Amino acid sequence: MEMVAGRMLPAAAYTSADVLGWELRNLFAGTWTCLGRLDELLPWDDNGRPVTQRAVRVGHVGGLLVRHDTQVRMFANTCRHRGHELLPEDATSPRRSIVCPYHGWAYDLGGSLIAAKGFLDRSGPSSGSEFDAGSHGLAELPARVWEGFVFGHGVHRSHDPAVPDFEAHLGDLAGILAPYSIGSLVLADRHAYEVAANWKVIAENYHECYHCPQIHPELCQVSPPDSGHNYDRPGSWIGGAMTLREGMATMSLTGERVSAPLPGAPSDRVEYVHLLPNVLLSAHPDYVMVHRLVPLAPDRTWVECSWLVLPGSPGAPGAVEFWDITNRQDWAACESVQRGLSSPHFAPGPFAPNEDAVAQLVAVIGDAYRAGGIATIRPAPAS
């Protein structure tokens, strides 16, 4: 694809199944992808028993998320015998061992093979000393928990030891969001949307308010559309902050606070940040909104929108109503862009000066296409 600096990506980047397949391998499985909240992925049941296993997807890679003692680990969701999935996608299990439903091979929660009929029983080898159970353990994939979110990487370290450091991936974002204590917040509400647009169209829309005066009258009432400024700090993320209008306490239809204020959070602004590839974090004085993007097709994206508040808060209905209106305005615009991208007359247009974060995102994606994956966008300076 021919890419021009300061302009949108070519249409194929948004419409081609081959490009999306490459992105799932290299931008989603090939870096730290957000899988969801730990307390929802591996919850405790009503009897106080933990879910120990959940099948997840990291880009094109099937993973098995496991609660092992106090650790969260992830393995490839494929049996070392004949490749059968250990759990169907998104299925869970409370078992203390991982058992393949095809031939019954079993693994402990650390991934070691503990039973394989005809090869190994629980007391040791049963088909001759040539069978090495140690070489048939599950392939471990990198997983990390940060602020209550689970992040997974689809590359096995033994195949590619250059898995990027998670702290370098976060960079200065951890410090910017620290006042919000996101890991201590609880789910107030959630909406899921299926948007007929490429995931990058949705991300690009998130990164600019050039469009806000045209389609977001409610938003413009509580936050000036030209108030944004973007950060240039270490880490694989893009974003910035926008201020609230004088007299407005938060982003809601009335500008009134919708939940208990978050201790330590700034009272006059909202942080809008995109931790690549797929999580958009919008931190407000009294709640945090999270969009998690899951590409379904070149022109279709599943978006999970969650609102997080302090424990004990009654919820955030005013924020949910405000952002559902705003989300749907955005989705309509994104779907129109997607239809326009399919026109034979589309040509990549230039970015306006206040679309600098979009230009940065497009430059990062373009560099990834050329280099084979997303590196840390802005490494920390050498000490």
Image (cartoon, rainbow, N blue to C red):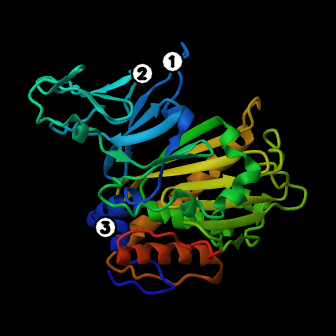
CA distance for labels 2 and 3: 38 Å
CA distance for labels 2 and 1: 7 Å
Of residues 382 and 316, the one nearer the viewer is 382
Q: How many numbered discs sit on the rendered protein?
A: 3
Residue at 51% across / 36% down in the picture?
A: 71
Look at the numbered discs 2 and 1 and tell me whether their residues touch, using CB distance below 8 Å: yes
What amino acid does circle 3 point to?
Answer: Val
The quarter of the displayed image where residue 173 is located: bottom right
Which of marks 1 and 2 precedes in the sequence? 1
Residue 191 in percent (x, y) is at: 56, 40
Disc 3 crowd rating (10 Å Cα; few below 14, some 14-19, many 20+) is: some
Q: Secondary structure at mark 3?
A: helix
Q: Which mark is residue 270?
A: none
Q: Secondary structure at mark 1?
A: loop
Q: Which mark is residue 94?
A: 2
Of residues 198 and 321, the one nearer the viewer is 198
Look at the numbered discs 2 and 3 and tell me whether their residues touch, using CB distance below 8 Å: no
What amino acid does circle 1 point to?
Answer: Arg
Disc 2 crowd rating (10 Å Cα; few below 14, some 14-19, many 20+) is: some
* Residue 2 horizontal side relative to residue 170, left or right: left
Residue extending farthest to the top is 47
Q: Which residue is mark 1?
A: 49
Residue at 38% across / 21% down in the picture?
A: 95
Q: Quadrant of the N terminus?
A: bottom left
Q: Which residue is mark 3?
A: 19
What amino acid does circle 2 point to?
Answer: Pro
Against 280, residue 210 (above or below) is below
Residue 149 in percent (x, y) is at: 56, 44
CA distance for labels 1 and 3: 42 Å
Q: Quadrant of the C terminus?
A: bottom right
